[in-house]
Amino acid sequence: MRTVFLKYGLLLLLMATSASAFSQKEVRRDVRKGNKAYKQQKYSEAYSFYDKAVNANANSLEASYNLGNALYRQKEWDKSVEQYNHYLTIEKDNPDKMAAAWHNVGNALLQKKDLQKSMEAYKMALRLNPADEETRYNLAVVQKMMKDQQDNNQQDQQNQNQEDKDKKQDQQQQNENQQQQQPQNQDQKDKEKKAEEQQQPEQMSRDNARQMLQAIEQDEKETQEKVRQMKAEERKQKADDNRKKSKDW
């Protein structure tokens, strides 16, 4: 009985080993096909082979790293960073490869304009491979970009402050002009009112003069009428006296 179990156990072990070897062979074959397509700049096709290899063996270092490269070439920045990070979790023995992965992470983040994280990735790459001049150059470029961005932000802030200051000064000047115009306008109104008041008595004097003239004319007419009546009475009296004298004689 024990012998039978041993035979079956050995058979299962051989089958598992054979299946694993076959799987690894398939992975290597897909990686080679992916590499060939990648060299021909057929990045979508290369991605398919690498992805198939990673699905078959998630710990395949070459398939994982090259899958990140294929994603990067297709401008899949976020996915490429994710894949490089996966590679860095399984690569423990090759600092140069790890530095290369961090370098590529920095490039992808730079494409996204995430300058701060890109700079940090390049620094990680240089810690692992201080002799990598390309990474050192990229780090210097990012640092220059960050400085320029900071300077531009400061200049924009200064321009905004100056613009706000100019607006405030313009508003103050406008307020001062309005305050200066208000007394002038009031003076003009006062002058107009005074002139109107001066014209009103003059108009009233003319009316009074007209009324007085009319009254004088009326009085003169009445006086002339009285004089006329008096003269008529005198003539009548004289006529009566003459008649009386004539009769008496």
Image: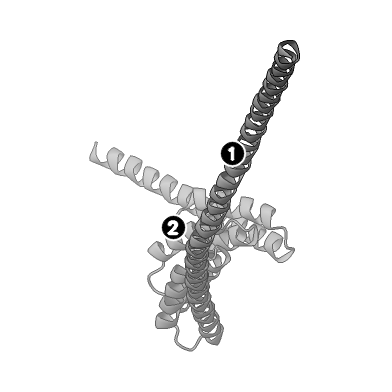
Q: Answer left or right for 221 relative to 103.
A: right
Q: Nearer the viewer, mark 2 or mark 1?
A: 1
Name above or below for residue 114 compared with residue 128. above
List x then y, in percent, for residue 172: 47, 66
Q: Residue furthest top?
A: 247
List x then y, in percent, for residue 93: 39, 74
Q: Residue at x 47, y 52 (%)?
A: 57
Image color mode = one colour
Q: Amino acid at mark 1?
A: Asn
Name above or below for residue 200 compared with residue 44. above
Residue topped by disc 1: 208
Instruction: Report the Cα–Cα distance between label 2 and label 1.
Output: 121 Å
**Residues packed near mark 1 inside 10 Å, few (<14), some (14 to 19) or many (20 plus):** few
Q: Is residue 131 visible?
A: yes
Residue topped by disc 2: 59
Name above or below for residue 91 compared with residue 122. above
Quadrant where the C terminus sits is: top right
Helix, strand or loop under label 2: loop
Q: Nearer the viewer, residue 14 or 204?
A: 204
Q: Nearer the viewer, residue 192 or 216?
A: 216
